[in-house]
């Protein structure tokens, strides 16, 4: 695996204000393509498989390259490499930038993080584990807003009866199915 680090700025408009955040982008080569991780001063802000193949090609040719010496980025790269070798994720959620994530969604994402590789839980089961048995739809919303879909494995959360429902990461249900197959080495029917 190989990581490339980029420095950039993201702009958010809210309540009439234009806020500027300095972010660093880390691109890690994986069996599923490039994984893009956005880092803020508070930690890992988001990560997902890169949708922009043009950026991937330009980075391969050396454009946009910069280097950020951050031990957390190295730990994250190691965790991703380990995941694709062993299906075990070894990264501490305290290193995430949880800004903008409600307490309920944090609780649900932490429960999702605990689902073992090769197993699934339903939205309803996660709602019950969170002490909100009637909040299955709210759990679905938390999964849809998951900014860390490979790290917090929302692909392991399925609809009632095991039905594959949406996936917040790149590729939608096809990626969800592929990741479940990768983890369980079992047939996955959509």
Image (tube, grey):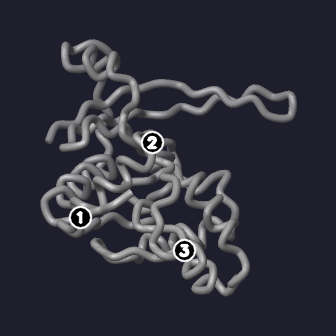
Compare marks 1 and 3 and give the one earlier in the sequence.
Answer: 3
Residue situated in front as seen by the camera: 123 or 36: 123
Compare marks 2 and 1 and give the one earlier in the sequence.
Answer: 2
Residue placed farthest to the right in the image?
16
Q: Residue at x 48, y 52 (%)?
A: 167
Distance between mark 1 and mark 3 Cα atoms: 19 Å
Residue at label 3? 160
Label 2 crowd bin: few (<14), some (14–19), many (20+), radius 10 Å: many
Q: Is residue 58 left or right of residue 150?
A: left
Give the quadrant of the N terminus: top left
Place of residue 36 in the rendered image (x, y in percent of width and height, measured from the top left): 37, 37
> Quick one: SS at disc 2?
strand
Label 3 crowd bin: few (<14), some (14–19), many (20+), radius 10 Å: some
Distance between mark 2 and mark 1 Cα atoms: 35 Å
Place of residue 28 in the rendered image (x, y in percent of width and height, measured from the top left): 25, 39
| Circles 1 and 3 in contact, beta carbons < 8 Å | no
Q: Nearer the viewer, mark 2 or mark 1?
A: 1
Place of residue 128 in the rendered image (x, y in percent of width and height, measured from the top left): 62, 85
Quarter of the image where one finds residue 104? bottom right
> Quick one: SS at disc 3?
helix
Residue at label 2? 39
Residue placed farthest to the front in the image?
189
Label 1 crowd bin: few (<14), some (14–19), many (20+), radius 10 Å: few
Q: Residue at x 65, y 58 (%)?
A: 141
Residue at label 1? 187
């Amino acid at each position: 695996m190989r990581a490339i680090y980029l420095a950039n700025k993201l702009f958010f408009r809210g309540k009439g204000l234009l806020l500027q955040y300095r972010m660093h982008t880390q691109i890690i080569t994986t069996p599923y393509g490039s994984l893009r991780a956005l880092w803020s001063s508070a930690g890992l802000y988001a990560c997902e498989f890169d949708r922009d193949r043009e950026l991937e090609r330009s980075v391969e040719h050396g454009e946009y390259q910069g280097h950020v010496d951050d031990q957390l980025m190295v730990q994250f790269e190691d965790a991703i490499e380990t995941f694709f070798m062993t299906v075990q994720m070894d990264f501490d959620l305290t290193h995430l930038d949880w800004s903008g994530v409600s307490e309920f969604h944090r609780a649900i994402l932490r429960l999702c993080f605990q689902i073992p590789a090769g197993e699934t839980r339903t939205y309803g089961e996660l709602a019950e584990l969170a002490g909100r048995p009637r909040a299955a739809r709210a759990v679905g919303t938390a999964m849809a807003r998951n900014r860390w879909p490979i790290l917090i494995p929302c692909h392991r959360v399925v609809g009632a009866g095991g039905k594959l429902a949406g996936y917040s990461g790149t590729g939608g249900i096809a990626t969800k199915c592929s990741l479940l197959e990768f983890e369980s080495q079992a047939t996955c029917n959509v």
